[in-house]
Image (tube, rainbow, N blue to C red):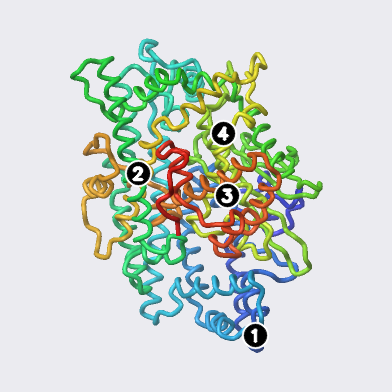
Amino acid sequence: MNPFLEPYNTPHDTVPFDKIRMDDFEEAFLEGIRRDNELIAKTINNLEKPTFDNTLLNTEGDTEGYYDLLARVSTVFFNLLSADTNDELDALAQKLQPLLTRHANDVRLNKRLFERIRAVHLHHRKLTPEEKVLLDNSYDGFVRSGALLDDTGKERLRKLTEEASMLSLQFSQNLLKEEKAFTLHITEEKELAGLPDTAREAASAAAKERGLEGYVFTLDAPSYGQFMSYAEDRELRHKMYMARNTICTHDNAENNMEICKRMVNLRREIAQLLGFRSYADYVLKKRMAGNARNVYSLLDQLIDAYKPTALKEIEELNKMARKIEGNDFEMMPWDFGFYSHKLQLKKYNLDSEMLRPYFELSKVINGVFGLANTLYGITFKQNKDIPVYHPDVKAYEVFDEDGTFLAVFYADFHPRKGKQGGAWMTEYQGQWIDRKGKNVRPHVSVVMNLSKPTDEKPALLKLSEVETFLHEFGHALHGMFANTRFESLSGTNVWWDFVELPSQFMENFSIEKRFLRTFAYHYLTGEPLPDELIRRIVKSRNYMAAYSCLRQVSLGLLDMAYYTKKEEFSDNILTFEKEAWKKAIIGKQLPDTCMTVQFSHIMAGGYAAGYYSYKWAEVLDADAFSVFKRQGIFNRKTARSFRENILSKGGTEHPMTLYKRFKGSEPTIDALLKRNGIKQEGDRAKGKQR
């Protein structure tokens, strides 16, 4: 039997990964579409007057004995496509994507279904606040998907969305192939000069995996980052840098240049077909920022506040590099990480290798879980009976403070072939409450690319990797604490510039001594992370903070430059990119490097016209954590308020309403500026974030 078509019969109805065959996907997709169409036909053929209950609840899937087969198989398929793909899965995605996009259009452009929803929108019984949000979202979703267009417009929209869907998939597949295709194979020991043992051991293991002698370095984050920070061979750093920063620009099948141009134009045309001037106008109507003017206002505020400090940071770095290399030395992009590490070592006597022995992965896991227990009272228990999709993945049962089952949590830690770079949180099952009152609990997953164990050592993380874990775990908590009636409003189903608040909030704990004391012990000696190292960590927190801020702002500017365009985009991407973000760039730009063609967030992810949200949410997270700093970072009452008012509410109310209920006031940029050392205590904030 196809496991998607029958009860899972697994712990907590988790996905039976061990039973799924490749052939099962297509059969389940086709059956899921058939069932979807059957449910829609039942809804639109109902002769009764359209009501919230006989129309909206059906489309939400709130019917007895119902599970959404299409959502069930789609979730598994597309999560595996990112976390553990192969050629067969990629080919199947190419085959199925047009079918799925066509079906989505069939639903959103179904005139009879929309007429029922519009009738309910105009005339409905008294609704609860959550029901009202669901109704408004459903109506707006249909309108924003073309329901009010005439037949010609609908047909045009179908073609545009189907093409955009295929290009998005192709973009991601090209990027993964290019990332995994490059390796730097080293056989000469002298070329490893400067690299720490952890980097050498990992590179040796990578070579053995490929049946090679010597050492292999890749473009995966742990390997690339260490090489660029420590390798003394400047030419090899140059080679690695250019490999990373020219991905998908080469004259081959994986070139993403034309795909990006077409994606920008498709999205602009879709927005204009729906009555908006630009794609940014279309997107920002459903964001906290509201419009492009407010986005640029935030980005400009950050440039004004951070650029003077960033220029000083870069000058200090150049000065030190010239002192080492001579007055004629010109800093190039592949030198930045190398000399930045040296300067950090000089200023704070600190680098990531000093800290690694104290951040053994199993201890970090215990620390992160322990933090959740301290704040919220929840506990984690690994359950090896829960099937997983790869041996690297660990599955946990999560229990609430009163011992009741809360969620399933999957954690996938290390890079491998077939896994996209970066880190993300996703779900295999969302949370919702059925008509009988059963609270269906979520199955949440975090996927990362952290340092792997070697033959000599367990997985030892950098502090930045601990922060990555905390970040994704913050998203996971948002999903696990979900407690709403409707799945489409639960967990991380919130406005895009609010979704990063729970994740970035958790990063704040990474330098807190009381947190570090709970898990940071030397993996060999058992000695705790020394107070002196913690002091240096705290002192160095703002090292290159202004430069890093401008880097994020530059990406926000690039994103907005593409998606505020009102005319056809026909520029050369290489030159357009460098012009778009130049006011936030303070380093040397190279003519052949390109971010756009590998910028998954805005080309294949959900951040098109929304990348600014990382900085928007950073204002929120600094402001929120300032409450914890005042009341105690482990204060249970404060944590309970954060859970009840933000983490559990999903998208059931306006984000600012939720935030003000937690904090008591709107956020300002003040806490962020003070956290980054741009302003001192006592300085007044310039204004509120609206």
The amino acid type of the residue labelled 3 equals: Thr
Q: Position of residue 603 (x, y in %)?
A: 38, 52
* 158, above or below 460, in the image: below
- Residue plotted at (57% across, 48% down): 502
Q: Which residue bears the numbered disc 2?
A: 305
Are the residues tagged 3 and 2 within 8 Å (C-beta)? no
Nearer to us: label 1 or label 4:
4
Q: Position of residue 292 (x, y in %)?
A: 35, 61
Which mark is on residue 102?
none
Q: Secondary structure at mark 1?
A: loop
Q: How many marks?
A: 4
Q: Secondary structure at mark 3?
A: strand
Query: From mark 1 to mark 3, how far is it between C-alphas?
Result: 35 Å
Which mark is on residue 46?
1
Q: Secondary structure at mark 2?
A: helix
Q: Which residue bears the numbered disc 3?
A: 426
The amino acid type of the residue labelled 1 equals: Asn
Q: Which residue bears the numbered disc 4?
A: 510
- Left/right placement of residue 278 relative to residue 287 reads left
Quarter location, residue 59: bottom right
Q: Is residue 133 visible?
A: yes
- Residue plotted at (51% across, 55% down): 498
The amino acid type of the residue labelled 4 equals: Ser
Nearer to us: label 2 or label 4:
2
